[in-house]
Image (spheres, rainbow, N blue to C red):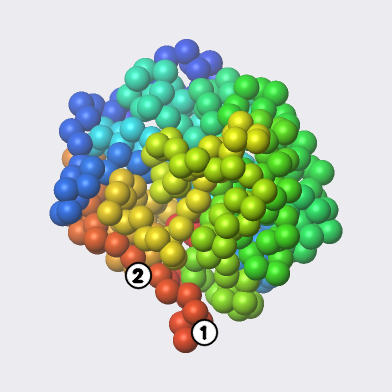
Amino acid sequence: MAGGRGFPRHSESRYSRPTITTGQATGMLDPFGRKVTYLRVSVTDRCDLRCVYCMAEEMRFLPKADLLSLEELERLCAAFVGLGVRKIRLTGGEPLVRRGLMTLIGNLGALVRAGDLDELTLTTNATQLARHAEGLAEAGVRRINVSLDSLDPERFRAITRRGDLGKVVEGIEAARDAGLAVKINAVALKGLNDDEIERLVEWCGQGGYDLTFIETMPMGDIDGDRTAHYMPLTEVRARIERRFTLTDSDHRTGGPARYADVAETGRRVGFITPMTHNFCESCNRVRITCTGTLYMCLGRDDAADLRAPLRSGLGDQALREAILSAIARKPKGHDFIIDRTHDRPAVARHMSVTGG
Ligand code: SAM
Ligand code: SF4
């Protein structure tokens, strides 16, 4: 096995003991003194949906041969944990369409149980969640994010270009019943779901889910004009405040969302505002793609190839050095702009490549 490190499958451990050795965590500081503790891993660029703000209808996905194997993804995650990462989010594309993903989740979950990792979590469209919810909870996942932009079946199908709302809701309920805390993520889309903002707040309150709104980011070509549906979250918040009482909260989940408590529902509503309020000063995260490319910033093109050191046969020291030299280049921030004079994507790659 690459690097000489073995990874017993979770069927051997049945989630009872760590299967990955991470070494002594050393900590990673970027040039601006920010500690990198959060790794997002896109396990596949493929997806069973084609959300209009995320993908084009016809997408050319990566050849399967280019993807890191699950063992390689594990080894990469272990290297990051060894360097001080405390939270891992698996994303995509749609993570649950990657075959064998539950094995990876089982093995990474062992790191949580061993205390080497504070949290293992997932962002999913929930189309396959109903059959995986129990397994996720059993593996040590405690919270998941589910993307849901509309509660109207027709509209949901239109936004996702093919999705079945019933299946998604079934998945969300299965996750809740399995004991997972579910946070709903909704992209605010003017003219597409802005009249559902209050309903989403209410529905999440009734179901016991927190809710986060996201501004659309200019990433990748999508067969359409993002500026037409761009909606600043200042408008979303103003709309919510006409019906609900919001009190700003100190609650943080390690990500960029800023939260407020909703008095009427007893839940929280969060706002992720990469466009109207850039959150780079507190950025603690980096992202790897399913081919092992490390992006130090979601909104920048600079990247480091980790697949070569991973496959070099030189062992984990070479991999650690490649990671550290990339972290030393982490930029101060992005400068996303979305308006009529900037209607090209700020970065060519889609969110599904880097992982949202
Ligand atoms: N397929 C999974 C899902 O939809 O939850 C995980 C990957 S998806 C790329 C992660 C998140 O990115 C989703 O919440 C999605 O709404 C969001 N997203 C995708 N493209 C975006 C864009 N251009 N701007 C803002 N958010 C975007
Ligand atoms: Fe797929 Fe998620 Fe992108 Fe929608 S947002 S197309 S579900 S990757």
Q: Amino acid at mark 1?
A: Arg
x, y percentage for residue 158?
Answer: 77, 63
Residue that mark 2 sits on: 335
Q: Is residue 318 left or right of residue 100?
A: left
Q: Earlier in the sequence, mark 2 or mark 1?
A: 2
Tell me if residue 276 can be seen. yes
Q: How crowded is the residue under tag 1: few (<14 C-alpha within 10 Å), some, or many (20+)?
A: few
Q: How crowded is the residue under tag 2: few (<14 C-alpha within 10 Å), some, or many (20+)?
A: few
x, y percentage for residue 328?
Answer: 17, 54
Q: Amino acid at mark 2?
A: Asp
Q: Residue, x 42% and y 74% (percent of image)?
A: 337
Q: Quadrant of residue 184?
A: top right
Depicted 246 relative to depicted 217: above or below? above
Which quadrant is home to the N terminus? top left
Looking at the rendered structure, the secondary structure element under dot 1 is loop
Farthest bottom residue in view: 341
Looking at the rendered structure, the secondary structure element under dot 2 is loop
x, y percentage for residue 248?
Answer: 46, 42
Q: Residue, x 22% and y 47% (percent of image)?
A: 34
x, y percentage for residue 350?
Answer: 51, 65
Q: CA distance from mark 2 to mark 1?
A: 16 Å
Q: Residue, x 20% and y 36% (percent of image)?
A: 27
Q: Quadrant of residue 196?
A: bottom right
Tell me if residue 65 can be seen. no
Q: Nearer the viewer, residue 65 or 302?
A: 302
Residue that mark 1 sits on: 340
